[in-house]
Image (cartoon, rainbow, N blue to C red):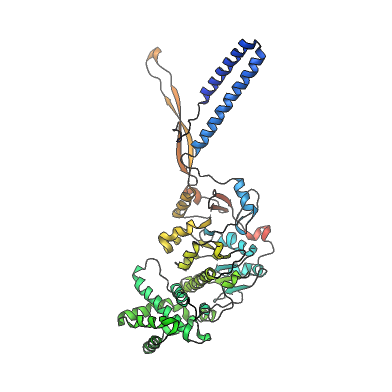
Amino acid sequence: MAGPLIGGRRPISWRLAIVVSFVAAYATARWLEGIFGVGSISGTVSFFVLVGLIAATWRINSRAANRQSELLGSARFGDRADVRKLEASGDLLIGRSAKSGKLLRYDGAAHLLTMAPTRSGKGVGTIIPNLLLLDRSVICIDPKGENARVTARARATKGPVWCLDPFGVSGRPPACYNPLDRLDPASLDLAEDANTLADALVHDAPGQSGEAHWNEEAKALIAGLILHVVTTEPLDRRTLATVREYLTLAPARFADLLAAMQDSAGAGGLVARAANRQLGKSDREAAGVLSSAQRHTHFLDSPRIVASTATSDFTFAGLKESTATVFLCLPPDRLDTYARWLRLLVSQAVTDMARSTARPARPVLFLLDEFAALGRLEPVERAMGLMAGYGLQLWPILQDMHQLKANYGERAGTFMSNAGVIQAFGVNDHATADMLSRTIGDTTLEYDTVSTSRGTGWGENRAGPSESVSAHVTARRLATPDEIMRMRPDQVLLLRQGEHPLAVEKIRYYDQREFAGLFDPA
């Protein structure tokens, strides 16, 4: 038998307890019989003594067993009561109860995180169901335009729907958004806003630390050019296309531009400083910085992107003031080339939301499908540490843990620790399964072993065989990595802050009654 917990008691042997109980009951009966001389009274009292002693033994053993059962770990899966909490309230759909069939909802203020590989049903079970039923503003990355095609009609009943879709994959009328429209030449935040845009345009890809210097200098040059565009150009030319035009000028004309910037008083002298920084470099370094800036803005040569960023049909901050939906559509085969456009929009949206003083009844939801394609975005990382008091709620959707670590390294823990719900299904890599297993924790496993010893001695003195039973306690993962990887395709693992984990059913919007009549064909 394992040792007791600190300050605890060892469980009492049932054999000993029964023997002691009967002896005590018999002694009590004889004592009462000697006093009263009536067998019925002594028998009745002795019976209650027997029952009381056995009950006391059971109570002591139950308490000891409970302490023993959590000796090396107390993790357990949630029960029916835990599931019922998710059936009662909330609006973010995270699964369906296998027992009652009811939709399960999250009503917390924290962000969410989904890990599921490609073709595992993220759209069917997570993204589309929420778009169909949510009555709040949503910004949704929609790589194939499928989410817009299926849910735009339902979203239009909540408020305006805008599809930023330069390549026309959604089949919806394309909207436009110009990131420079919100930059105010007279604002004290102008420099910060320009730096945020430059940071989104210059993507520091993982494993390219040798490019760090060139990327940082390219950011500084691009930010300076953005400031110059905003402070000197007419409204119709305050666009990213003009920034790209500057960067691709002939060498002599680019030198003239920098000279003009040196004489500018725009942005409190920051335009001139940016020009001086570039002109102060050696010819070789200056050429390298310009080349890097050109490389990071190459996507702005696309006429589709130029048209999409020429003007603005809405503001992101406006989504906090009234319900609306924005789809960011970019086909998968163009993600690598045009990911900077997505980075730019998501970064701008998060920054605008955090800065806006509006307080919506429900936070604006960011459904960030293909989150890894965005690379590392500091505004998103900062926002992940914020709650819905800022009016935004992030829901990054990844294929596995590798993607998160590749972009954020050790900072990947920020996303895990600030997620009120981690949703996982279809897990097919060991690293992600092991992370989930460790997050769930250990449980205490109790088991007995039986050993048999042969008799000893010779002849008539030979002793017979004997058996002994030993009790053992060990720790075990409540869900091992291989068990997580072997979950059924229709199962969803839910890890919630401060709650027991749950294994629930995946939603399938296309054949379930709650969504009937709300969606259109994909």
Residue 144 drawn at (x, y percent): 55, 69
Q: Is residue 140 left or right of residue 465?
A: right
Quadrant into which the C terminus falls: bottom right
Residue drawn 48% across the image and 77% down it: 188
Relative vertical location of residue 484 with respect to residue 318 in this rendering, above or below: above
Position of residue 434 relative to residue 169, above or below, is: above
Residue at (61, 74) in percent of width and height: 172
Q: Residue at x 55, y 81 (%)?
A: 311
Position of 402 with respect to 176 (left or right) is left
Q: Quadrant of the N terminus?
A: top left
Is residue 481 shown to the viewer in this render? no
Q: Is residue 33 above or below residue 352?
A: above
Q: Position of residue 493 (x, y in %)?
A: 54, 52
Task: Return the residue nearer the eye: 8 or 403.
Answer: 8
Q: Position of residue 120 (x, y in %)?
A: 54, 59
Percent of width and height locating residue 12: 50, 27
With 94 as the anchor, is 415 left or right in this view? left
Can you see residue 411?
yes
Camera-side residue: 483 or 66? 66
